[in-house]
Image: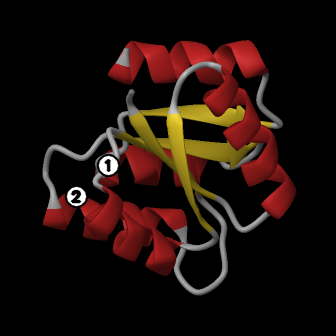
Amino acid sequence: MPKILLVDDAAFMRMRCAKLLTENGYEVAEAENGQEAIQKYQSYRPDLVLMDITMPVMDGIASTREIKTLDPNARIVMVSALGQQTMVIEAIKAGAKDFVVKPFEPDKILATVRKIVG
């Protein structure tokens, strides 16, 4: 069962996405900011990280850079609100594989996850 790490400061977004993923056969862990994501990444070793960009403590771009330093093969997909195109480009440069726009469509999230981890 592929493992997904959900990183978002909004608890309702994590809850909604975690429910969708677990119902579709994925194991899910959660983090509420980029700093926590780095710690969880090291202990949980997920197959994929779904990472919000704008968060307190440490944003998703800084966290993506740090995770990619720890594991160059890390697979990270950014989840961002509309209007954050420059941040998405920055995230891709930092090593993100793809991005999904919030509020996300369940089918889009699942298609993206399946494309990357099966």
Q: Depth check: give the residue in front, 116 or 47.
A: 47
First of labels 2, 1 by sequence position: 2
> Taking 14 as reference, is 44 left or right?
left
- Say which amino acid is labelled 2: Lys
Query: Dot 1: few (<14), some (14–19), or many (≥20) neighbours within 10 Å?
Result: few
Residue at (36% x, 34% y) in the render: 97
Q: Which mark is residue 68?
A: 2
Task: Identify whether 97 is placed above or below 92.
Answer: above
Q: Secondary structure at mark 1?
A: helix
Quarter holding residue 11: bottom right
Q: Which mark is residue 104?
A: none
Q: Secondary structure at mark 2?
A: helix
Residue 52 horizontal/vertical position (percent): 61, 55
Image quadrant in which the N terminus is located: top left
- Say which amino acid is labelled 1: Lys
Mark nearest the camera among 2 and 1 is: 2
Residue at (62% x, 43% y) in the render: 79
